[in-house]
Every structure is written in C-alpha cells, then in structure tokens.
C-alpha cells in the first residue's frame, strides 16, 4: 500500500506530488537582497532530491524588513530575474516553488548567525527597526524599535502587496505570509509585544487586524487559484502571551478569508520563552488547529524520520510535513524516505543508476 507521505495533495489549482515540504530557512547569503548561485544550488538540489514543495526562505518586502543585511529580498523589480531562473529549475524537477514573504520588525538589523547574530548599530550597517510598540527584544540593545504610526503601517501593507506582484512575475506557485517566530506580524498578535491603545492593540480583534490587512493586500495581487499559506507561532511559550486558543480563533478567520493552509510553528517572540523541546514537539499544535479550525495544516519541528512523518499523517495530525534541519543534512530526503517506506518514486534520470 502506498504511503501517506508520498500521496499527492491538491491545494486549489496546484497538486503537490507528495507531502514533503522544504521549510523556509534563511541562508544569509544574499547581497542587497539578490539571490545568487548559492540559492540556485541550495533550492535546486532539494527539488532534484524529490520534494513536493519548496518554500523559499523569509524574503524581505523592503530593505528594513530583513533580519540581516544578507537576507533575500523582493522589494525591487531587479530581484526577479534570478528568482525566476531558480523557480524554472524547481518546476523542471516536478517540484513546486513557494515563497515566504516576511518583515522582521524589531528582530531586524542583526548580523548573520556565524557573525554572532548581534544587533547592528548604524555604524555597522544596521538600520532603525520598527514594531507595534517600542519594546526591544533584548534589554540594552543599541536602539529601541520605533512604534509604527498609521503611515508606517500602511507602507508595510503596500510593501507586501508590491512584493506579491513581483512573486507572481517570478513564477512562484505558493505564497506563505510569515506571521511566526517573533517577526513583525507575530509582534502585533501578541500582547507581550503589542501594547498599543489604538485599533491595532488591546483586544484579540485589534491585535489580529494588521495580519488580516496584510492577507487582504496580498490577495489583491495573488491569483485566486493559487494556494495561500500563513505561518504562525501557535504559542509564545511565555505567560500572558499568544496562545493555542487564539491560534485556533485566528485560523478560523483566516480560513473564512480564503487562506488554504496554516503552517504551524511556535515561539520566537520573547527571549525569556521556555520551550519543551523534543521530537515532534510542535505537532500537537498543528493537530489542534486542524481539528478545531477545520483547516489544512503543516507540521514542523524536530521531525527527522520517515516513519515519524508517516505516523503524523496517518493519525490525521497534519496534512503536510515541513523539514528544515533534516533537509540541510540530506538534500535527497524524499529519495531515502521512499526507500524506507517501500514506495517507488521517480528519481531524476541522471541519478537513476543509483536507485537500486
């Protein structure tokens, strides 16, 4: 009997050949937002390795939206050409190219991990960060984030809209809005980082307003027959923060608004979070949202084995399995997983002699 992991999934007009997804993972290898051959080989090798969907790393909608100066961007038309080349290769391998549009908010302006992941001041090439409220991520940072005013909020909504238009031109077939890991949308969602007193703060309805406005702006440019995903952190893992019940509530509203799937992660908002990490530790959140909001979900987080992924799908806990670090260790993850699950899948012709 064929496995669930290698069964197809149709999202609107797109059919994924299997349930294996490359999770968006920053490579910190761009200059001025431009993709290069590193991104082509990194993403292309996962496509030839057999995955159903590749979601490109957090791609900034403006220069100040980047986490680091080395992040990918899609804030100008010149970025499109290389992205189009990468996507054409992904499609040639019978995989689906996706993009994650992102704004880092107060977590922006830091150095790459191998340079210490440190806040950059202006002399080091850093920039003024923005947030719902002037609350820093770490105490003692060189400058506070600037609380967004109405004009700032509207600019970011316009940036997401313009980035979506470019994403269509670049050939992406799935679009994910990044509302997780303590980045800007998540900062609006959580009462720990959103202490506003206007229509964007306070009540649940006010705190989700910015995310819903981003979704609506993206939908004005994103084709209605292509899948739209939102990634959320289901909990802040911190007292008084965003929680799983609010995640269910938001997911119900996003489904009504036409979002196709919730990519369910957790944490990343506050430095004092206390996470109980273990294999598949975030899967129960994906299951809760799938069952209580009646929407498709993706599960992520320390999922490393074929049988583990298969079990998640068989139990109905999620509909897609996203792999991050395990796919960095092994670009050919699906080829190996198919063998483990006794599934006969198509290999690239160039590699077929290694199949037996």
Image (cartoon, rainbow, N blue to C red):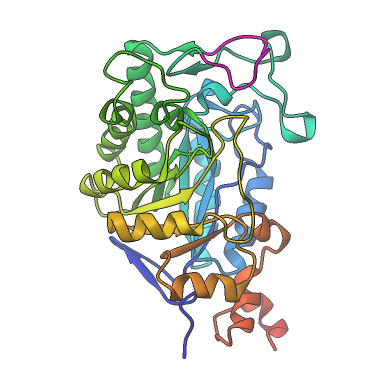
Regarding residue 52, the answer to whether it shows in the image is: yes
Residue occupying image coordinates x 31% and y 21%: 200
Residue ranking furthest to the right: 115
- Circle count: 0
Q: Position of residue 107 (x, y in %)?
A: 58, 25
Regarding residue 348, the answer to whether it shows in the image is: no
Q: In this rendering, would 352 be left or right of 168?
A: right
Q: Position of residue 303 (x, y in %)?
A: 60, 62
Residue nearest the observer in this picture, 24 or 179: 179
Residue ranking furthest to the left: 256
Q: Main secondary structure of the magenta part?
A: loop
Quarter occupied by the C terminus:
bottom right
Quarter of the rendering containing residue 111: top right
Q: Position of residue 103 (x, y in %)?
A: 48, 29
Residue nearest the observer in this picture, 64 or 263: 263
Magenta highlight range: 135-145
Residue nearest the observer in this picture, 282 or 177: 282
Quarter of the rendering containing residue 27: top right
Magenta-drawn stretch contains 137 = yes
Vertical relation: 81 (above or below) 324:
above
């Amino acid at each position: 009997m064929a496995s669930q992991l290698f069964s197809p999934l149709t999202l609107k007009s797109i059919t994924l050949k299997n349930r294996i997804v490359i999770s968006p993972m920053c490579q910190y290898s761009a200059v001025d937002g431009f993709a290069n051959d590193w991104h082509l080989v990194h993403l292309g090798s996962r496509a030839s390795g057999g995955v159903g969907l590749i979601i490109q790393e957090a791609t900034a909608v403006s220069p100040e939206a980047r986490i680091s100066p080395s992040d990918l961007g899609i804030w100008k038309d010149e970025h499109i050409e290389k992205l189009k080349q990468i996507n054409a290769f992904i499609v040639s391998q019978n995989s689906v190219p996706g993009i994650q549009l992102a704004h880092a908010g107060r977590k922006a302006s830091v150095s790459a991990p191998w340079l210490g992941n440190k806040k950059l001041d202006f002399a080091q090439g850093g920039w003024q960060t923005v947030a719902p409220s002037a609350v820093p991520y770490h105490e003692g940072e060189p400058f506070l984030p600037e609380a967004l005013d109405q004009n700032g909020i509207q600019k970011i909504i316009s940036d997401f809209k313009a980035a979506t238009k470019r994403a269509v031109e670049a050939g992406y077939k799935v679009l994910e809005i990044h509302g997780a890991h303590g980045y800007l949308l998540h900062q609006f969602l959580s009462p720990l980082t959103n202490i506003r007193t206007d229509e964007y703060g306070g009540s649940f309805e006010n705190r989700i307003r910015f995310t819903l406005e981003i979704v609506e702006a993206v939908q004005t440019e994103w084709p209605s027959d292509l899948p739209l995903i939102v990634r959320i952190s289901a909990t802040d893992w911190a007292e008084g923060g965003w929680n799983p019940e609010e995640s269910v509530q938001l997911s119900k509203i996003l489904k009504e608004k036409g979002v196709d799937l919730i990519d369910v992660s957790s944490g990343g908002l506050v430095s004092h979070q206390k996470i109980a990490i273990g294999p598949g530790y975030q899967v129960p959140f994906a299951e809760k949202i799938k069952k209580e909001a009646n929407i498709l979900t993706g599960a992520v987080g320390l999922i490393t084995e074929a049988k583990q992924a298969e079990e998640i799908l068989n139990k109905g806990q999620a509909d897609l399995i996203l792999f991050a670090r395990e796919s960095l260790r092994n670009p050919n993850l699906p080829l190996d997983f198919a063998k483990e699950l006794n599934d006969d899948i198509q290999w690239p012709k160039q590699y077929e002699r290694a199949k037996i």
